[in-house]
Image: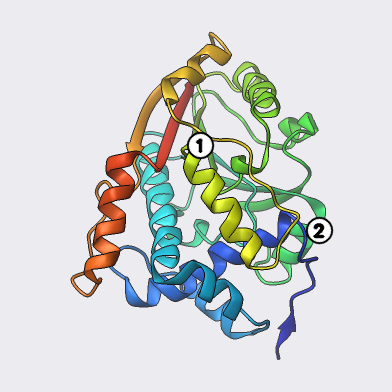
Amino acid sequence: MEQKITLQKQTVQSTMLLPLWGRAVASEKNPDILYDRQAIDIIKNCDYDFSSIAKTFGEFGGICYVVRARKMEDAIRQFIKKHPRATIVNIGAGLDTSFSRVDNGTIRWYNLDLPDSIAFRQSFIPDSERNVSIAKSLFDTSWFDQVSFNPQDGIFFISGGVFYYFKEEQLQEIFCSMAKRFPGGELYFDAESRQTVKKSNRMVQKTGNKGAIMYFCVNNAKELENWSPLIHLVSCEKYFKGIPFNPQWSSGIRFMARVSDWMGMMKFVHLGFAE
C-alpha cells in the first residue's frame, strides 16, 4: 500500500525528504560507504515525485547525503565503543535510520524533532523500547528531562543537516544550556562555509521550497569555543576524509569532492562539554 507524503512543502520539516532521497539513491550505488535498506523501502512505498529533488541535487548531492550518514555513524560507533550503554540523541531526526545500523543492543536512542515531523516519521519508522521519539522543538528545553542521562554511561548528540536553519544566537543559547545540563557530553554535526550556505539556499529553493532558509555557517570551528567555557572543540574534519571513493564515480564527482575538502566547503564539527 502506498503512503502519501503529507508534509507541507514550504517548511524546514519537508527538507527531511532530501536526505531520505539521497540515502536511498546513493546507497544503492555506493554500498561500501553505506547501505540504507529502510530509506530505499520508504522511497519505493511513497506516492511522491522526487524528480525535482533529483534534478537539482544530482548524483553528487546524493553522495553527500550518504557520506553524511556514514560519518555520523562512524562517530557514534567510536563513542559507544567507549560507552556501550550511552544515550544517543538525534537532533532533528527526520527519517533518519541510523539506529538500525549502529545499535549494539544496549544504547538508548532518542529522536528529537517537531511534532508534525515525528508523526510523519512514526508512520514509516515506529518507535521501539530503546529507540524513542520526542516530539518537541530543540529549543523547548523540557526535552532535557525526557532523556535518560547517566554521566558514567555518556551522552552523544548528533545532528545532520539541521543547524543550518537556525541563527547563531539561537544555537549558542541551546548549546550552552546543553553543556550545563549534560556535563561530559559530546555533540557531532555537519556544517558549511558561509559561501556554501548561500549556494545551498539556492539549491533548496530550486526544489520549490521557499520556506527553508539557511543561516548558520562555520568557517572556523575553533571560534565556537568562544560561546562558553564549558564548550571545547574536539575536532573539525573534512567532509570526505576517510570515505572510500567509488571507482565508478566520474572524474567530475571526484573533482567536486576534492575541491570541497580543499576549500573547506563542508565539514564535520565535534564538540565536547566540560565535566
- The residue labelled by disc 2 is 116
Q: Residue at x 22, y 75 (%)?
A: 248
Question: How many residues crowd mark 1 within 10 Å: few (<14), some (14–19), many (20+)?
Answer: some
Question: Which residue is rendered at x = 49% and y = 62% of the image?
Answer: 100
Q: Residue at x 18, y 71 (%)?
A: 247
Most foreground residue, 254 or 47: 254
Does 220 sit above or below residue 29?
A: above
What's the residue type where badge 2 is placed? Asp
Give x and y (percent) for residue 236. Answer: 37, 31
In three-dimensional space, the C-alpha distance between marks 2 and 1, rounded to whole angstroms, equals: 30 Å
Q: Is residue 240 visible?
A: no
Give the residue type that dot 1 points to: Arg
The colouring scheme, among rainbow, by chain, secondary structure or one colour, is rainbow
Q: In which quadrant of the rendered view does residue 7 lie?
A: bottom right
The image shows residue 16 at horizontal and vertical percentages of 64, 60
Q: Earlier in the sequence, mark 2 or mark 1?
A: 2
Residue position marked by numbered label 1 in the rendering? 194
Please tell me whether mark 1 sits on a helix, a strand or a loop. helix
